[in-house]
Image (cartoon, grey):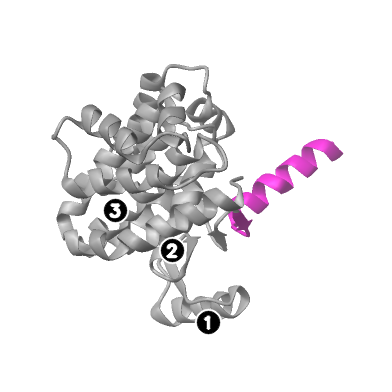
Amino acid sequence: MRGETSLSSDKETRAKYAPLLKSKGKDALRVAMELYTFVTLLDANRPLERALTDPSRPAEDKWRVIDTILADKADPLTVDILHDLTDHQWSRVVHIANAAEDMSVDATAYYADALGITNQVAGELAEIHSALLGMPLVLFRLSDEYSDSKARADLLRALLDGQHMHPVTEQMALNATIDLRGRRFPDTIVWLVDRFSEHMDQIMVTVTTAVSMNDQQVSRLQEVYGRKLGKPVHINSVVDPSVLGGMKVQYGSVSTDGTVATQLKHLKRRMAVAG
């Protein structure tokens, strides 16, 4: 949780650079990648975080530190954003890395806008979360901060192999397990879905069924969940024959599983206990 000072600083920077990131179009991806690289650097270097958030240190000095690190190799907008972050005050030194991550996600969302894939990326992230909900051991391994980050990344790559997801989706998911940032992998994925939904000013609702839903069913679900959640809703429809029937609905961290497959599992457990 961030303090009021950090929340205010983060909000100001995001609002200031939103139009500039939008105007970058496809080039926003470079900014996103450079910002995230800087996030990983900050996470591994607490003295650097302290140097860049020290209120007694002149702004020009902090800028010089950033310029030395980037060595004229970063996009000018990346440099400008990082300069701006050091100009703000933070409740805790680690919050500057969180803000840089926020800006990286914003840049990725604007890149997705430029390609017309924003809904696709958000939907694919939601599908990753939904698919892994029933795999506690896998989620543990993807969230284990004591394991090797390469091993976590290799595991996720193996899971995503053949799923034909957009490279941006895969990279964001890989970032979530390579640099855990003190979070569990599924929590980061939910956060990313929420951020993309916020960017689109709607809520992503993933509905898993055994067969494809028709337009009338999708419209009905949009109406029901739009009324329930108080915001426009995008239905991300996932077809999985293994659920047999019924549907599983997920939005944010909320998941309701009314599939036939899950009901059969519960029935088998009750029969085993009764026997």
Q: Which residues are magenta?
A: 254-275
* Residue under label 2: 197
Q: Quadrant of residue 36?
A: top left
Give the distance between the C-alpha atoms of the residues marked 3 and 1, in whole angstroms. Answer: 31 Å
Q: Residue at x 44, y 22 (%)?
A: 47
Check disc 2 and report its element: helix, strand or loop: helix
Q: Residue at x 38, y 40 (%)?
A: 173
- The kind of residue tagged 3 is Ala
Q: Is residue 131 above or below residue 25?
A: above
Q: Position of residue 147 (x, y in %)?
A: 48, 17
Point out the tag, 3 or 1, that comes first from the N-terminus: 3
> Is 224 or 18 nearer to us in this picture?
18
Check disc 1 and report its element: helix, strand or loop: helix
Tell me if I can see residue 164 in this picture.
Answer: no
* Residue 237 circle label: none
Residue 257 in the magenta stretch? The answer is: yes
Of tags 3 and 1, the one toward the viewer is 3
* Residue under label 1: 223
Q: Is residue 134 above or below residue 20?
A: above
Q: Position of residue 166 (x, y in %)?
A: 25, 49
* Residue under label 3: 107
Q: Is residue 127 above or below residue 82?
A: below
Q: Could you classify mark 2 by the number of other residues whose Cα lies within 10 Å: few (under 14), some (14-19), or many (20 or more)?
A: many
Q: Among all residues in the image, which is located at the extreme right?
A: 274
